Amino acid sequence: MRDVFPWPLWWICALLAFGVICGAPPAHAQGNYEIQVYGADTVEPKSTMVELHSNFTPEGQKYEIDGVYPTNHQEHETLEITQGLTSWSEVGFYVFTSEQNGHGVQWVGDHIRPRVRAPDSWHWPVGVSLSTEVGYQRAVYSRDTWTWEIRPIVDKYLGRWYLAVNPALERTWHGPDIAQGVGFSPAAKVSYDFTKQISGGVEYYADYGRLGAFDSLHMQQQQIFVVTDLNVSPKWEINFGVGVGPTAATDHLIVKGIIGRHFSWKKPSPVE
Amino acid sequence: MLKLSGMAVASAALAALAQQPAPADYTIEIAAYGLEVAPRKTIKTIAYNRQVPGPILRLKEGQPITIDVTNQTGNSEVVHWHGLFLPPAVDGAMEEGTPLIPGGGRARYTFTPRPAGFRWYHTHTFAGKDLHKGQYTGQHGFLLIEPRDHPAGYDQEIFLALHDWDGDFLANSDGSMDPVYTVSTINGRILGFGEPLRVKPGEQVRFEFLNSSPTEVHWIALSGHQFKVIALDGNQVPQPQTVPMLRLAPAERVSAMVEMNHPGVWVMGEVRKHIMAAGMGIVVEYAGSSGKPQWDQPNQLLWDYLKFAASDAPSSQQADAITIPLVFESKFAGHGAMDHWTINGKSYPDTNSPILTAGQRYRLSFINRSTNNHPVHLHRHSFELRRMPGTPETHGIVKDTVLVDAGTEVAVEFTANNPGSTLFHCHQQNHMDAGFMMLFQYA
């Protein structure tokens, strides 16, 4: 890769952090529409990644609370389209949908997620990127309708092992949690390459609540997924997992799947 | 042939040096060096005599030579004389028995250079994941063995080395880690930095290209001109041919004549755009011409070894040639690791060591079952290309390194005429470091 990175990453981090702290206040994590620990890599320029996230909650919240539909037996289908901009940046778009008995197929909301990463030319020992995600979700699916997230991403391959950490910060722009401050929602992944094609591991997702005044463990969202990644081709991304949520504030059982296809718009030429 | 050699040899030579030995014909100092590849872009590397490429060594065929090498680095080093028919003690590969030169130490190499032609010299040490060691550094230089009678036939001779720098191991699309570089140079400088090559209309210029890159194949074109290829790896080809571009795998050399018949200011550089953008190019300026250098972007990559093969019908495999099949495969070691490489199922140092009989003809059948191309090199001998993928038998092209494309088979033949341990390996530094080596032994 040959990269040119005009702005220092620390400058962008500072700008985003300033926006989070001084802007509007915070939110609970958006529901189980996109369950994924991000890797630091970005989509190449002149190419697009199209992903379908399919998540089903066999055992979730059974009651309507504050006008929000229960999550039990909800099927979420999320379309994610990510366009590579440069060798160090991309932008992603999400369309969230939900299907449930009694409610049918519903549009839930949309998000946009720009992301930058440390270029390869910096020779950092770990992959580092930073995404910010902003969007709307209907009030019947989330109490907070406008939310913002910044997500630092650090990852590293070590032989057959892969490690990734996403210590995300969230806040609400519009909704009942607007006064709650910055929420801390970390995610992490550890996986192992059993073969070139098959990897398996564990993904962890949480929402600890307000930064500096975490909820009690009982009220935190905590989920652990056993996952497998199938690396059948550079063009495809396939991930399956089953997760449990042991705390009262978490859906207790979720099945997730991601299937992605990479499309390149580069002119096929041996000299490109 | 060898008069005195090595430093096994060299340790003995140390004592001799202390007793005021005769001065060497050449001295090489291995030391840290800051290579300014572009304005405000300096690569910290290791070089020979604080220059990249190292000094041109012009030797006479058959005339004994003495080269003193001092190692000013903190690591052991060794200098390999690539393409020469030398004894193992001085060939410059510790696997064959050449002693390493310890950090702070020195050695005297004494040998009789042959065969005539364009050779080169370079480090031959393990780098592993350290992209500041081994062939990833600037330790390479041109070595020309002039024949006893040397018909010039040209007005200028220009040596050009292609190299890649500032690498990182990144995951590739087939699942392992490979070096990816941010800077690519010709003679240690990026396009537009440094003096242009100055030529005159009507000149015959002989270009001696060397790909000293640790891992990358390169394609070179000179806008407005064509190359007449006259030698590969320093050995004259049976049929010199004119081609629009050259392809050089790591360690390969191409000698090509260019008739300077198109005055102007031109770019000679890598045909692939992203490598050119990383700097691999040099300006060629005619006397009396000025202006912005012109680059006509080719839109395809063209190269075929067999274009230069003998035109007469080759004999089929020599009846007395013994075939040695060598199967190249990789073993996955994780998306965060380099693949392990095997020859016939084993990685060096566990690879088999076929026993050669002096005077016997051998046919090496390279069967590449991997998804990578491999520039394979045989030390201390030359071989003749006999079969390339999808073609009938050929002959006449003599080389010491050949690129075996992924998923293909290539056959070469050589005569076992230089007894002693003989190293065979992929010249991609990361492949040889990960086991892609084996030794031939003589009975």
Image: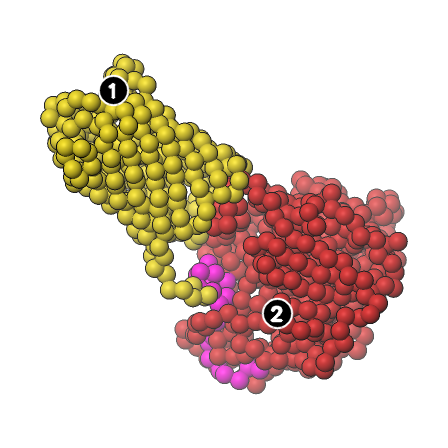
Q: Circle 1 sits in a helix, a strand or a loop, which is it?
A: loop
Q: Is residue B294 visible?
A: yes
Name the side, left or right, on which A165 lies relative to A185: right
**Residue shown at 45% from the left, 31% from the top:** A201
Residue B277 percent across, percent down from the top left: 44, 61
Name the side, left or right, on which A24 lies relative to B408: left
Residue A200 percent across, percent down from the top left: 46, 34
**Residue shown at 37% from the left, 61% from the top:** A266
- Please tell me in which quadrant of the rendered image residue B315 appears: bottom right
Mark-to-mark CA distance, 2 and 1: 65 Å
Residue A214 is inside the magenta segment: no
Badge number at residue B390: 2
**Residue shown at 30% from the left, 22% from the top:** A252
The local crowd at label 2, few if under 14, some if 14 to 19, many if 20 or more residues have their Cα within 10 Å, is few
Label 1, on which residue? A249
Q: Is residue A104 above or below residue B106?
A: above
Q: Circle 2 sits in a helix, a strand or a loop, which is it?
A: loop
The local crowd at label 1, few if under 14, some if 14 to 19, many if 20 or more residues have their Cα within 10 Å, is some
Q: Quadrant of the C terminus of chain A?
A: bottom left
Q: Which residues are magenta?
A: B258-281
Q: Colour of chain A?
A: yellow
Q: Nearer the viewer, residue B394 or A91?
A: B394
The chain letter corresponding to red is B
Residue B91 percent across, percent down from the top left: 78, 55
Badge number at residue A127: none
Name the side, left or right, on which A272 lies relative to B78: left
Kind of residue at badge 2 = Gly
Q: Is residue B125 visible?
A: no
Residue A87 percent across, percent down from the top left: 37, 51
